[in-house]
Amino acid sequence: MSESQQDGQDLGNRRYEPPEEFAKNANVNDPSVYDKANQDYEAFWAERARELHWFKEWDQTLKWDPPNVEWFVGGKTNVSYNCLDYQVEQGKGDKTALLWEGDEPGDTRTFTYSELLTEVQKFANVLKGLGVRKGDPVSIYLPMIPEVAIAMLACARIGAPHSVVFSAFSPGSLRDRVNDCEAKVLVTANQAPRGGRVSKLKENADKALKDTPSVENVIVVRRLDEDAPMTEGRDRWWDDVMGEADAGCPAEEVDSEDILYILYSSGSTGKPKGIVHTTGGYLTHVKATTKWVLDLKDDDVYWCTADVGWVTGHSYLVYGPLANGGTTVMFEGVPSYPENDRWWDIIERHKVNILYTAPTAIRAFMKSGTEALEKHDLSSLRLLGSVGEPINPRAWVWYHENVGGGRCPIVDTWWQTETGAILISPLPGITTTKPGSATFPLPGIFAAIYDEEGNEVEGEGQGNLVITRPWPGMLRTLYKDPERYEQTYFSRYGKEVYFVGDGARRDAEGYYTITGRVDDVMNVSGHRLSTMEIESALVSHPAVAEAAVIGRHDEDKGQVPFAYVILEGNREKTDDLMKELRNHVGEKIGPIAKPQQVIAVDELPKTRSGKIMRRVLRGIAEGKEDLGDTSTLADPSVVDTLQEQAAAQG
Ligand code: WTA
């Protein structure tokens, strides 16, 4: 066992009790909540739902017709109303709802709840004026600026599902996402400054718009005072349309199960999955977990660093904090600009109390040392959160000691775009944490571990993580593709059991540790590596169109990463390029993740449902003759080609 792993394991055996003072003041500190939720979980969630504003209460809490679920059936509510009007009614009109910090230090804008409500109503009227009606999807391709939250809330206000597309996505990704939901309106910006550099967002959008027949109107935020190519009759500036818009737009009374948003999540297949979230259950789950897990309180300044183009930005930058009447920080820039102390500067200046971020960021800071942190007063922080990938014990402890000054509990929150909100996490006022473990399923959440055959693994053990009862924030379907929904999540272990796609380990005390995607995990010299992470590093290289990584058996190291890439356009397969790609992964993730070999191929072996058959790739990498059953491949002949190409480059 390597020294660093030993180190990591020792750290993973540490225990951290909730600090007494923290526990005393925590939003939830009575451990009986777990039992109560176990006894009657529908009643538990109904109680959470009652903390929302409803125009009409529901008739039925849960309708579970596997794999289809409805929560708070018959209830009428509105997410925008909950996040804005309801807060103003409770006297929070003058409270800061959104605190925005731009790319340049000190470039800030703030919106009180009343101000945000006004902007949202105006933009809702703009959308209505463009013919957007309840149920009509709107695509939003905006960077981290207040207008993105305004546009989302405006859609919610009129019952138009939004589809936010990450602003760093390419024109092609935007095009596919717009076309899949057939949006009539696209909201974008002329430019997007980030880290001192400017991307010409509207030009990207225009490339996509060449091939998006559904789009009739484009609204363009003038983020920087520059012009942009505008198409007469289709494109309008945000300021112009807002200037003409009426400030009154009552929130539509939407059904609990009406779609709030579609968020595309790219699977291992080429076609992104349009994950559908609806209204009442989603907001219930998101509001409750922001309060319970992130412990958001009235006087907190809360900062979730996720981009709004991802689910974390939806649930915990916009909807969760606003539904609780909190102050949410939105940061446009990057941690290293203009200096590498930017985050700590923001925390100090805005007196941030809660920081919710990702292990990747923590590990990057860890690498550059504590000097930048030490320049700033971070004593306002009282709680730290982590999300998005397994956090290794060393990063956890570093985060705890150096960012949290040893006094802030850490909530390692496990969830997915599909789950809408947090499912497995400590409750910071109750749970004794262990570094590297997301600890326990939250009250009202029923997780289990199954083996390959579908038997439940009891007690200490390892296997596939599943969720055995529906939860309010659960995805309802994949947009216009219910078959793929059932196939992806409810075929592995039947219609009643949600197949997560992550592996998990449970220790003797019931603590869960998420080990990564089940088909994408390898173990190199005792280090668990996620193939997905390496794949995304590879595709971040401009020469790579698609990548598939597997763990190849290795005598010394257990496994080593082995990569197959499809090159962009007419890039040539040269040895130099392969070497560059290996180094690129090394730089992106770390030397340990460097593929032992990268080979360029024309095609990857995919099943008819588009899933890469890794077993075949593993067999080829290990030089096996017999690759097992390949009849479910969309095109079984790719195997021969692959074998030839591998041999030629081996
Ligand atoms: C991984 C992000 C370990 C996991 C909210 C999951 C985690 C995928 C954690 C979803 C965590 C997320 N510990 N792994 N705390 N949180 N993951 O859809 O593999 O972008 O399935 O949602 O991230 O990623 P997604």
Image: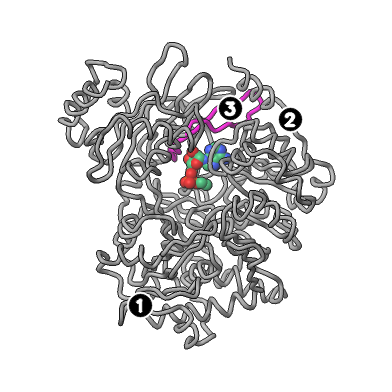
Q: Which of the two marks, 3 or 2, is nearer to us in this view?
A: 2
Look at mark 1 in the image and give the residue it sits on: 235
Q: Is residue 230 visible?
A: yes
552, above or below 214, in the image:
above
Q: Which span of residues is magenta-colored?
A: 497-516
**Tag 2 or tag 1, which sits nearer the N-term?**
2
What is the crowding at mark 3: few (fewer than 14 residues within 10 Å), some, or many (at least 20)? Answer: many
Q: Contact, CB < 8 Å: mark 1 with mark 2?
A: no
What is the crowding at mark 2: few (fewer than 14 residues within 10 Å), some, or many (at least 20)? Answer: few
Residue type, mark 2 in image = Arg
Residue placed farthest to the front in the image? 576
Residue 326 at what x, y percent from top left?
A: 68, 63
Give the main secondary structure, helix, strand or loop, of the magenta stretch: strand
The answer to whether residue 154 is left or right of residue 10 is left
**Tag 1 or tag 3, which sits nearer the N-term?**
1
Report helix, strand or loop for mark 3. strand
Residue type, mark 1 in image = Asp
Q: Looking at the image, which residue is at 64% across and 25% down?
A: 8
Q: Looking at the image, which residue is at 67% across and 45% down?
A: 36
Residue 406 at what x, y percent from top left?
A: 78, 39
Q: Looking at the image, which residue is at 59% across and 17% down?
A: 2
- Residue nearer the viewer, 351 or 96: 351
Residue type, mark 3 in image = Arg
